[in-house]
Every structure is written in C-alpha cells, then in structure tokens.
Image: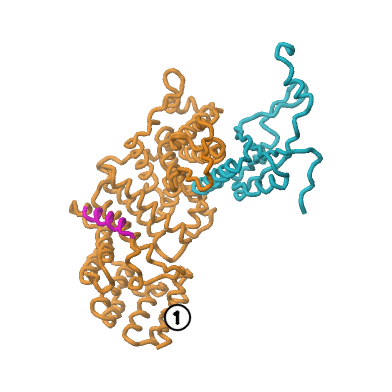
Chain colours: A cyan, B orange
Amino acid sequence: MPPTLPSTAATEYMLLFRTLGWEENLSPQQMQDILDRTLGWFDRLHAEGRLKAAQPLFEEGKIVSGRGGAVVSDGPFAESKETIAGYLIVRGGTLADALAIAQTWPMLEAGANVEVRPVAPECPSFQRILARPLHDAA
Amino acid sequence: MTPPESASSAPDRDESAGEAVHGLTEHLFRHESGRMVSILTGIFGLQRLQLAEDVVQEALIRAMKTWPFYGIPDNPTAWLLRTARNLATDQIRRETNFREKQPDIIAAVEGPAGGITLPRIADDGNEFQDDHLRLMFVCCHPVLPPEVQSALALKTLCGFSPAEIARGFLVSEAAIAKRLTRARRRLQEENIPFEIPPAAELPGRLGGVWQTLYLLFNEGYKASQGEEVVRADLCAEAIRLGTVLASHPAGNHPTTHALLALMLLSAARLPARVDAAGNLLRLEEQDRSRWDRTMIARGLQHLAASAGGTSLSEYHLQAGIAACHSLAASEDATDWPRILKLYDQLLAVNASPVVALNRAVAVARLHGPAAGLQAVAEIPDRERLDDYHLLHAVVGELEHQRGHDEIAAAHFRRALELVETRAERDLLARRLEDCLER
C-alpha cells in the first residue's frame, strides 16, 4: 500500500540519518566497503539531479532545556547512542520516491536507520522577514 | 573535543558518475589501521595499546560517515592519522590523573608552547616501518602463548575485527575477544618494551616472529577449516608482514627470506587449487597456467636471498620443495629426486609424522606405490596419524594406484569419516567412486 501523503504540497524531502552505535563493531574492511557503496549512492543521486543539500553533523553536541536554558546535557539519547549523523535533501518526486531512495542507503545494512520527512514550503512570515531591508530590522 | 578535520574541498562530483572509481586502494582501511596503531603506540606507549586501537576505530568510523558528504580527502591516510591522533590527545587530556603519572607522554603531546607539536607525525616511511616492526615484535613476544600472538597480530597489525579473526580460526568471537584482552593485560603486567630487540636478543626474537607469521599463513593455507575468502586474506597478510620484516635491516635475515619464499611459492598455487565449481583439485589435476607467475618470481628471488648465510632452517627446506613444484611444467616433469632429498633433510631437522607422510608421497612418485606404502608403514610414531584423514587418503590413493581397489575404498571411507570440510569430503568421495567403478 502506498504511504499516505501529508496535506502539504511538498516537493522536497529531508533524509535524517541516524546512527545507533551499530558502527562500533564493524571491521575496517566492512567500513571501507560501506563507504565505497555510500559514495556511489551519493554520486547516483547527484547525477540524477535529485541532490539539493547534504551535510554531516559532528557527534559532540549538547541538549539545552529548562527555563533560561539552565539544563545543558549530553543529549537525550546518550544511552542508546542514537544521534543524527547528517541530513540530505532530495528535490522532486513524491514521498514514495524519497522512500525508495532512502531504502537503498547502504548504511541500512549495517543497522543504521533513516527518517524521511517532507519539507514544508517556506512559511509566509519567513518570506516577509527575508523581504524586509536590513536597516529596518535594526 | 576537537572536531575531526574535514576535507577542505566541496564534493567534486563528475556528472557522468555512477561507475565512479572512488580512488581508495583495496584494503586501505585495514592496512591503514595496522599502520596507525603502530604509529600511535610509538607516540603514546605500549601501555596505551587499547587507546590506540580505539581511536583508530573511531577515526575510520568518522571517515565512513563524513567522506560521502565531502568526497575523499586529497590525502586520506594523513586525514585518518590526524583524526586518530587528535582523538587520542583529547582522551589523554581528559584524564586528570594522567598528567602527574606520565609527564613524558604529556611532554610529547604538548610541545614547549603548550600546543600540539607531535613528533613523528610526518609520513616518514622509515620511522613508520620501525614502529610497525616494534609492534610486530611485541605481538610475537614469548610471554604470549602462540594462539594469542596470532590473534593480537591480526587485530593490531592487520586490522581484522574479532569476528573476522574468529571466522578465520573457527572459534567463537568471544574466545578471540578474551585472547585479545588477555594479551593486552599480559603486555602491561610484564611491562614489555616497545622496541626492536637489541642485536644480542634479535636472533631468538626473530624466531618467534617467523613462527607467528608461519602459523598465520598456515591457518590461511590449510584447506581444513574456515571460510575461503577469509583464509586467502590470512595468507596475503602473512606475506605482507613478511615483506615488511624482510625489507627492514633488523629483519633482513636469510631465514626471513626463506619463510617469505615458502609463503609466496605456496600461495602462488592457491588460484588453481579449486575448479570453477569450487571442487578441490589434486596437484596433478591443477591447471598450472593459473599459478600466479608474479608471486613465483618473487618467491624465487627471496629463495635466492635466503641462501646468503650459513643457516638452513625448515623454512629453507620447505621453500625448496615448493620451488620444485613451481618450476615444473607438469606433475611428471617435477624434480622428484630433489624433492625426496629435501624431505630427507627436513625429517632430520623435524622428525614429525606429518613430514614423513609427505615424504612417503614423494617416495611413491619416484619408486612406485608399493615403495610409498612401505614408507608409510615405516613412519615413526605412525599411530599419531590414525585419526588424520590425510593418512588414510594417501594410503587409499597408493592402494588404488597398485590396483587394490577394495583396500583403497576402505581407506577412503575411513578418511571420509574423519574429514571436516565439504571441499575435501567431495574430493575423497570422488576418489572412492573411482575405486568402486573399476
């Protein structure tokens, strides 16, 4: 059954790559094999003109919470080692197309997972802020 | 924590990509892993072997996760080493007590100005080779039991994971992990120095290194256990380490060359050992055009270099036998008299029943199956081979050759009861059928 499309008119999809500590037990050879296939995966997306943006995230981050940001912790998932390792935005197509792309991500085989989210169009108020000349804001 | 240094250039991707070659040498990660553990142990000391292994693993993980986004850095090996070194430095800085305990390491980590001015980070071939050799001598140190030595060498020098080592040795991953932990603890307890042994100790210590490399090679070479692919890797690694040893002044010994010759000449025949369907082939059935000529040429060079002294080791004799096979155009054209002479010498050095069994095969080639069977009967301590499938396979073969098919069949059946691998079982079953059909 095809996934239900959200009501937004999304044409871009964000892939959030999660790692779960699966990489700890990989051997160097396995890592090189996965790297090689992942490079090929990026190359194909780029060649098809689907790749809009992509960046990895460093792991050493903090979570700020509480009134006045009083609580600064090492992250909510420190125990399960679940962190977002990077994101990628594909353009065009449907959610089903984006899922099909995510399903071929080579790191899935090693136990990672990827979250696919439709990216909503820029909201009108953000466009208003962008349109405003800089000296007005000061 | 210092972020890993990222590749400076944005992804530079070719529009025609798809079959792009990504420019990483085969086994780069595995080989770099051994190189980096050696270098980092040289910097931080053998007490920190575990730290070196951990940060190398982490650096490779970061490469795997970030290179797809940025592309491969111009100098991947430098990127990996820098990242691993930074991770190690961070780790050591976090240990507050460490400062008082290890002022010399801190001095090396932090230069006079307090910045990181690590020595020996330059990609200096010689300096690295020294570290690699130091670690090799550590892995083969006599305080470690032999099975621990080879596991440690495969982990630290060759970059295999415990799971991969376990598959090569047909033991559980937990057993390998235990061996590795024991090895690291023992090295710490005994305060083993990270050094190339002084000249006076060198001959004895080299013996330990040869033995470990030989064991490693044999694990890969023998057909009796493990996965085919893993085993080919073990042979390749033993040859790689032997080459490093032979090209270093401390390891450039005639016996090192003999061992290397033996490994190269034997491994050269591996591609022809099975047919397209994966069936094991006997020497006389092998397509000799599939033997690796480059390896044979290298093997013969090292065999020549092995003659440069007065030593005549078992490796010399076995390499000599391997060379006789490599140089022969066919089974019949093989210099069997020379092979028999080498086996006689080998028996004089090592009176093992397995060597005597191999000698009996040479006797049979030269003087016929009856003489071969006589040689089998005369093997000293023959009862030690009663449960060895190859004894019964050889006797079955020789009885078959002289037309005693019923006796031959009985021996092949006994061999079939004892054999462990599918490939060997299939070969024996084929021979049994040959006996029954006549």
Amino acid of disc 1: Arg
Q: Residue at x 23, y 79 (%)?
A: B367
Q: Residue at x 43, y 86 (%)?
A: B436
Quarter in which the C terminus of chain B is drawn: bottom left
B359 to the left or right of B111: left
Give, as a single range, the part of the protein colored magenta: B292-304
Q: Position of residue A105 (x, y in %)?
A: 62, 46
- Residue B91 visible (yes or no): no
Q: Which residue is mark 1?
A: B413
- Residue B378 visible (yes or no): yes
Q: Nearer the viewer, residue B195 or B133?
A: B133
Q: Position of residue B310 (x, y in %)?
A: 18, 53
Tell me the element at label 1: helix
Q: Position of residue B345 (x, y in %)?
A: 22, 65
Quarter in which the N terminus of chain B is drawn: top right
B5 to the left or right of B350: right
Q: Residue at x 43, y 39 (%)?
A: B36
Q: Residue at x 71, y 26 (%)?
A: A64
Q: Position of residue B414 (x, y in %)?
A: 44, 79
B150 to the left or right of B349: right
- Read off the chain for label 1: B
Q: Is residue B299 above or below residue B47?
A: below
Q: Nearer the viewer, residue B65 or B386?
A: B65
On whether residue B308 falls in the magenta region, the answer is: no
